[in-house]
Structures are given as C-alpha cells and as structure tokens.
Image (cartoon, rainbow, N blue to C red):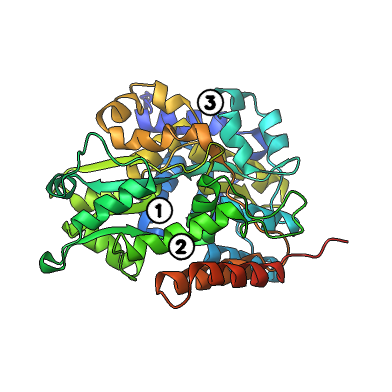
Amino acid sequence: MTLIPIRPTRRQFAAAASLLAMPAIVRSQSAPIELSVAYSIPVLFKELMESLAKEFMARNPAIRIVLRAPENGYEEIMQRNLRDAVTNTLPDIAFHGLNRQRTLAERRIPVDLKPFMAADDKTRELGFSQSLLSLGQVGASQTGIGFALSTPILYFNANLVKEAGGNPDKLPTSWDEVIKLAAAMHDPGKTRTGMFFDWTITGNWSWQGLVFSHGGSMLNADEGNVAFGEVPGQRSMAVLRRFVDDGRMPDIRPDTAFQDFFAGRLGISMQSTAQLGRYNREIGGRFPLVCARYPLSSPTARLPAGGNVAMMFAKDPVRQKAAWEFIKFACGPVGATMMVRATGYMPATTLPAQNKDMLADFYAQNPNHLVSIRQQDVITGWFAFPGQNALRITDVINDHLQTVVAKRGAPGEVLTKMVADVQGLIPRKG
C-alpha cells in the first residue's frame, strides 16, 4: 500500500512554528500550561481581554489562559489579591493600577521582570519606551510593564460648543475658559448641563490631576508630611468648588454623567482618555466629539499617568516563563494595537504608531486619540501613598471631595480637615 503524505494546513504549520518558538522548558510540558489572569474594569477590558487570550493561545498552543471573573475597579482587584496572598491563591498574572504597585511591592508579591527582559533577545524588538517603562518601576524593580496608559483629557460635544458661542477648533485651555463655556451651555429648560469633572476616578487620580497641574504634590520629599494643603492644593480645591458654583456642575454620579454626555445633554466632560473608545461607540453619529488637553495652571504643571500594568505573581519557574510570554504579547506591538483600537489608552510600546499595518493610519484618522499622546511632555507618576493605609487614604480623600461638590463645607475648611485626616494615616518617620 502506498502511503499518501498529508500536507499540514497553514493553521497547523503556524501552531507548530509557535510551539517551536516557545522556550524549551515550556515546550517540554506534555499538557498545556494553564495560567490564571486577573484584571478589572470589565466595561473597558472584558471583551479586549477575551480577544487577547484567544489570539495569544492561537499563537501559543502550549499555554492556556484562564481569565478570572473581572473585579469592578483597581481598589477591588487590590483587595482581592491581598486576600489571595494570604490564602496562597494568587493569579499567575494580574493587571493592576499604576498607583497600586507600591502596595503590592511592599508585600513582596510581584516578581521583578527585569531578569526576564534581560534574558530575552526579543525584548529589544518590542519597542518599549523607557519613559513609559519607568511607570512600572518601584525602586530598582520592574514591578510591571505598562499595558494601558492614560492621561486626563477634556471631552466636548462640538454641537453644544457652537450653540454656546464657542469654537470647536479653538477649545478652552484654562479652567476659567472651561467654566465660562460650561455656564453658557447650562440650560435647565432643555435638561442640559454644561460640565462634569469626574472627581471620583479611582485612586484619587482626579485630585492628583488638579494638584499636579497647579504645580503641587501629594506629600513632601521625604513623605513624612502631607503637601496638598499648600497653595497648589488650595487653588485646586477652590477650582473644584467653582465647577459647581460657576460652571453649574451637578452633584451626580459618573454613570449618570456618562449617559447624559452620550445622549447629548452634557457639554463638557473631564475623563480619562481610557474612556475614548467607549465614548466613540456610545455616541455613534449623534454629534461630533472633540477632545482637548487638560488645562495646566502652573509653569511646573504635571499630569498623572493613569492606567494599569501587567504584573507577574507566578513563583514556579516554568509558569514564570509562560507568564512572561503572555505579558510580552499583551504589552507588545500586537497586544497594544488591539488595546488602543478597543479603548483610548496609550501603549508602552512605540512601534504600533510607526507601523501602517498597526496604528499609524488609525491615529491619522482619529485625532482625538492623539491628545493624550501629546501630553506625554508633562506626564508623571500616579502617586501611591505609602504604608498599610493606602486604600483607606483613597476613601478619606474621596469623602472630603464629595463634601465640597455637595456644598456641605467651604473648600478651605474641608481641605484643612482632609490634610489632618490623611496625615494621621501615613507612616510616621523614625
């Protein structure tokens, strides 16, 4: 009997090639290595994570990705993983907010990624920006690699801008101009609101944005004393109240503001660029959306980088090598391209923006996505409060900001109380 050779399909050939490309220690496993992956904010990341896992497994048949049910936000996934550390049930990989790396590093939970980067010849081909890589560093360790990075920006309904006498091609560059335009848009008879500044964004990111853009900081240089009670913080708290008093900003929850903006009832929204993909999808063709840089109020102004990093928690050497392959894929050019198209975040790799087959044409056709990238000249870290009370400090600051927005206290008095409360929660020096 003559045996007829069976030619492998293109898919089978690709799978075999992917398998051979894997590190030998991973290929030697008789069954696929199963990695658990934790993430949060499903409204932004659920479909993306599912797509990433599917694409990665198609390219890497020796590794199986199991996504945990997503947590609602960065605080929730932090609390979950801190419990996991106690019960020895940590995921192999987790995506955490930039400002939560410090808390995890203080507990020695993440694995330093520097040795994996140094040992992998392909690392230099990933196009990781050194400045954005630095956002994933705690001390001398590469605690995480940026997956989805953001800055605060302003979203405008171009139609309402025109109706209020503004120019969508020349948008406000100061808070005074924003407040004036918002007041002109405000029209209760048409159930129309001028502006919403989302002060509730996770990890006091919005408060940091106000203080940093006024030239201030959260703590002093040795982190022994609260610094946001100084002049930049005072001006920031006063501006927050002016949004309410002069800009007619209502005391509503972000979910309500989102729906109002999507429906054309809200003119200006301060949000993370992370939400841009969602804004585009929800608005559809209802009205033109234009975005602008966040107002800077000081010659030394900075803006906090938001977003999350991919972190490795796996301790077994074989699982670590497999985990590095997934992190490298998710944060590298292919994963970054998928992420940008699905959201409004920036990647940590510069390659997709230079490649016409990835994001070069996308950015040319979607100028709103360039606003955040053009703010990299003033980007700084998302501050992480030290010590065991980091999560509690977040809640304390939010409670005081709510008091100002709800007009239950004068900005100066609230700020004084907020400083005292946070001072009592930071570690004492010596």
Instruction: Find disc 3 in the rendering and name its residue.
Output: 127
Residue 416: x %, y % from top left:
61, 69
Quadrant housing the C terminus: bottom right
Which tag, 1 or 3, sits closer to the chain's start?
1
In this rendering, position of residue 197 left or right of residue 106 = left
Q: Which mark is residue 117?
A: none
Instruction: Find disc 2 in the rendering and name its residue.
Output: 70
Instruction: Find disc 1 in the rendering and name its residue.
Output: 45
Crowding at label 1, few (<14), some or many (≥20) Cα neighbours within 10 Å?
some
Identify the amino acid type marked 2: Pro
Quadrant housing the N terminus: top left
Residue 160: x %, y % from top left:
16, 50
C-alpha gap between disc 2 and disc 1: 9 Å
**153 versus 402 height, above or below:** above
Residue 173, picture quadrant: top left
The answer to whether the residues at label 2 and label 1 have Cβ atoms under 8 Å apart is yes
Crowding at label 3, few (<14), some or many (≥20) Cα neighbours within 10 Å?
some
Which tag, 2 or 1, sits closer to the chain's start?
1
Residue 308: x %, y % from top left:
52, 49
